[in-house]
Image (tube, rainbow, N blue to C red):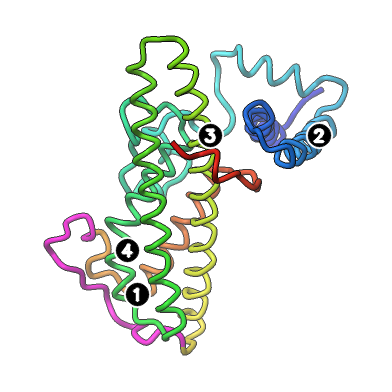
Amino acid sequence: MSLSEAQKTELLTLQKLSRQYEGIIRTSRNADQQNKAKIELKKIRDKMEAIAPGGAADQFLQTAAASAGPVYGKKKSIEDIGASYPTLAKMPMARITPNSDELEINVLGSVLSAWEQTFYPALGKIKLDFALSAERDSHFTVLEGLKRQMKILIETIEDYFKAVREDSKTQLRDMRTRQQRQFMFDGGTFLKKIHEFWKAVYEDIQANGPKCFNKDDHIQVDSRLEASNFFQGKSVRETARFTVMFLHEAIEALNLPDLPVDKNKGAR
């Protein structure tokens, strides 16, 4: 059967999700998590069959994997992420460590670095009411925890590539898988939370609501913070709008399944 470009893209996206759930089933030691992953995996496979019945989905995916022609769906390289996500491209996108080859891990790490170095200093200049201001401050504590997770993950990735003994490599590979899954889950949860927060702030600003006190001002950050100069002189409205767009693209690029993760399994 003939598939449209939209169907091809959806099949490749579903294939990527199915592999994530398959990985969870293979590596998770949590029975409840495994069962939930199996249920979600069946839903994905049923959806793929509905899009391209009678084995046509498998045939297309096999052809796409073997073909050297155009690749439908998301870019595979962190350096090319801006081709699909123009707002993300405004910020530096790089591997979290030279040996990190997982696109989503590198995207998440880059987004968190940009959030700390560029967004946080600028967004702190937006004057919000007491409740929103307190909630915004709480986001930094979560960010600090994610930075610690990323530091441990970087060490595990580099230790894996330095390991010589096969048993050590196996142990480190399993550890890396668990830590990556935990980092993606916690990071995705954080991004969704702050996206909803800044979306609500932006909508209030656009409606000339009472929650932002300096909606007509322009951002003035410390000129010594070079990374924060992106927002220097931009209006509060534009800064909030860009923030919402950036977070929306980041969440879309990560394409995370909503699954609970056993926090005890990510410890090193």
Q: Which residues are magenta?
A: 211-229
On the image, numbered disc 3 is attached to which residue?
178
156 or 77: nearer the viewer = 156
Dot placed on the residue nearer the N-terminal end, 1 or 3: 3
Where residue 158 sits, quadrant-wise, is: top left
Given this view, does label 3 or label 4 mark the residue nearer the observer?
3
* Disc marking residue 42: 2
| Amino acid found under the numbered disc labelled 1 | Val
User: Could you classify mark 1 by the number of other residues whose Cα lies within 10 Å: few (under 14), some (14-19), or many (20 or more)?
Assistant: many
Dot placed on the residue nearer the N-terminal end, 2 or 3: 2
Secondary structure mainly formed by the magenta segment: loop
142 versus 172 height, above or below: below
Q: Are marks 1 and 2 in contact (CB under 8 Å)?
A: no
On the image, numbered disc 4 is attached to which residue?
120
| Amino acid found under the numbered disc labelled 2 | Lys
On the image, numbered disc 1 is attached to which residue?
236
User: Could you classify mark 4 by the number of other residues whose Cα lies within 10 Å: few (under 14), some (14-19), or many (20 or more)?
Assistant: some
Q: Secondary structure at mark 1?
A: helix
- The span from disc 1 to disc 2 (Cα, nearest Å) is 45 Å
Given this view, does label 1 or label 2 mark the residue nearer the observer?
2
Given this view, does label 4 or label 1 mark the residue nearer the observer?
4
Q: Residue at x 42, y 78 (%)?
A: 134
Rendering coords of residue 245 (x, y %): 47, 58
78 relative position to 218: left or right: right
Q: Secondary structure at mark 4?
A: helix
- The span from disc 4 to disc 1 (Cα, nearest Å) is 13 Å
- The span from disc 4 to disc 2 (Cα, nearest Å) is 40 Å
